Image: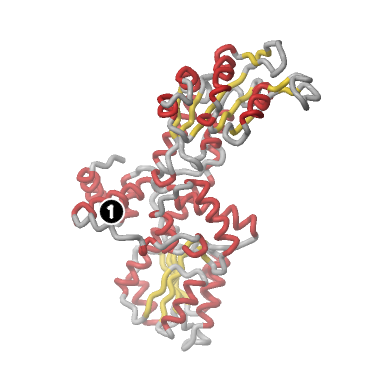
Amino acid sequence: MAKSTASEKRLLIVEDDLGLQKQLRWHFEDYEVEVASDRLAALDVVKKNPPAVVSLDLGLPPDPDGSTEGLSCLEEILAISPSSKVIIVSGNETRENAVKAISSGAYDFYQKPVDPDVLGHIINRAYHVYQLETENQRLLSAQKETPMDGIVASSPQMHSVCQMVEKVAPSDASILILGDSGTGKELCARGLHSKSGYSEGNFIAINCAAIPENLLESELFGYEKGAFTGAAKTTPGKIEYAHNGTLFLDEMGDLPLSLQGKLLRFLQERVVERIGGREEIPVNVRVICATHQKLHEKIEEGSFREDLYYRINEICINMPALNERQGDILLLARSFLDKFNKEQNKRLSGFTREAISTMESYPWPGNVRELRNRVKRAVIMADGKQVTIEDLELKSSDDDKEDLDTFDLRAIRDEAERKAISHALSHVGGKIGPAAELLGVSRPTLYDLMKKLGLKS
């Protein structure tokens, strides 16, 4: 991530107390500070140049002892600039106002009297979140340059997958894609197809686990008229439809043993025989297979042919699980939120801090597919301005069962530092300077921490 310019590091202070205005303006000298004394002045600033962070006093004229003017200002600011992080500062009816403000989309709530140092920590943290979300949006807008349309990622793990796709796509080698359900195996296969010499042909996908065994052979190889009861006309199979294109065999590990020999012959000879036919039909096709199963174990138990395994596995691509993709969970969640906001005609501004924390700690057994489905449901069901853990139907990370076997404070601290540094590096493409700024430490300190923890950029 490039270092933020002064024009980007903008802070708007909405406060009618002139003395507090001057104090805060002086305290936040690292920011480009603008000050507004009432709602209309604040909205004028936001319309001209939306700030990264807003410190908003709820008690604004003409209602300095209430909260109606401040809450109205909050909603109007977020309507103009949904990405701005608004921190509510108030001393009036604190608990009730906090609930109203957070449900209306405020980033945080701070109770007066103001301690500039404490407020400064909150504002700096909000600005870092703003930076992360801005970088995520930049990465999303650059997705058209990636080799796999539809893949949203910034993690080193997925960058490695994309680089491998770039290298192997132009070849005619048979590819085996391995990965758990929901990791994006078909998107990877489509990326290989689009970058290959077969991209002008069809991309034909067939799920070997979804079709009954007695129908799968005719689906793959086709049949001649009269080959069996109900075969009223000659019908080419999926392999023929993929001629001069790509054949994607998903869930290859579920291919019946009775068909594995016939598929192996096709892969060796590149000809097919329809059911009931005698003619050999040559087919020029790129074959890509995928499975979530451990094929070595199926070979040992005798349910998968070893010679077929080596034929389909000229090159292997491993798709990482979502919880192994450093930094991608929030990036994907925001991408899905934008997509479903448009589809459902909603205007949700983002995720609450608790929702973000819970999403990043959740194991995601269903991987990207599960994340997509949860965000879609949340967009449909959400009543507030932001998506909460209740909308996502996730359990709060604070409620997770304590690990009673871990009392080594040094180990806990090292692991927390390792995760934080890896997370920051993944968001800024491995660049030390921006990562240090994101973490709030100097470059030498970050280098020392990385050396101690065995991390590399």
Drawn side of residue 327 relative to residue 221, left or right: left
Q: Which residue is mark 1?
A: 416
**Position of the C terminus by quadrant:** top left
Camera-side residue: 421 or 258?
258
Please say which color scheme the image uses: secondary structure
Classify mark 1: helix, strand or loop: helix
What's the residue at 44%, 77% (across, down)? Answer: 98
Q: Is residue 355 above or below residue 27?
A: above
Residue 75 seen in the figure: yes
| Furthest-front residue in this view | 229
Spot occupied by residue 83 in the image (x, y as percentages of width and height): 50, 61
Drawn side of residue 257 relative to residue 22, left or right: right
Camera-side residue: 221 or 146?
221
| Furthest-bottom residue in this view | 65
Disc 1 crowd, CA 10 A, few/some/many (<14, 14-19, 20+): few
Q: Is residue 99 above or below residue 275?
A: below
Drawn side of residue 303 relative to residue 47, left or right: left
Q: Is residue 416 above or below residue 90?
A: above
Q: Amino acid at mark 1?
A: Ala
Camera-side residue: 366 or 198?
366
Spot occupied by residue 207 in the image (x, y as percentages of width and height): 59, 33
What's the residue at 43%, 61% (across, down)? Answer: 395
Spot occupied by residue 220 in the image (x, y as percentages of width and height): 64, 25
Camera-side residue: 69 or 364?
364
Residue 51 seen in the figure: no
| Furthest-right residue in this view | 232
